[in-house]
Amino acid sequence: MPARTHTTRPEPSGVDVRLPWWAVALPAVAFAALLLLIAGPGQAQAATGESATGRLLRHLVELLTR
């Protein structure tokens, strides 16, 4: 005669796990940025002066070194 096994269900602990807003927003923004980089123009073009990224980085450096 097989022995009966007694199984117990775990009691609900009442712990509510919630993520902060930035834990969802930051990966979504990073994914969108990488997707835009991949979906950008397929052909390289010659630079015609200083790029917007270069100006932004130079401006940030100036602000941080004050």
Image: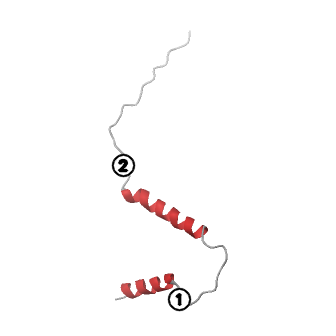
Residue at 46% from the left image edge and 83% from the top image edge: 57
Left or right: 48, with 15 as reference point: right
Residue 52 position, x and y percent, is 49, 83
**What residue is disc 2 on?**
18
Task: Identify the mark nearer the N-term, 1 or 2.
Answer: 2
Residue assigned mark 1: 50
For residue 13, which quarter of the picture?
Answer: top left
Please name the amino acid that badge 1 sits on.
Glu
**Is 55 drawn above or below residue 32 in the view shown?**
below
Q: Position of residue 15 (x, y in %)?
A: 33, 41
**Label 1: few (<14), some or many (≥20) within 10 Å?**
few
State the SS at label 2. loop
**Vertical placement of residue 36 versus 6, above or below:** below
Write the residue at 36% across / 55% down.
20
Relative to 38, 8 lies left or right:
left
| Location of residue 64 in the rendering, given as x and y in whole percent from the top left corner | 37, 84
Q: Is there a contact, CB below 8 Å, between mark 1 and mark 2?
A: no
Mark 2 Cα-neighbour bin, 10 Å: few <14, some 14–19, many ≥20: few
Closer-to-camera residue (27/48):
48
State the separation of the CA atoms marked 1 and 2: 44 Å
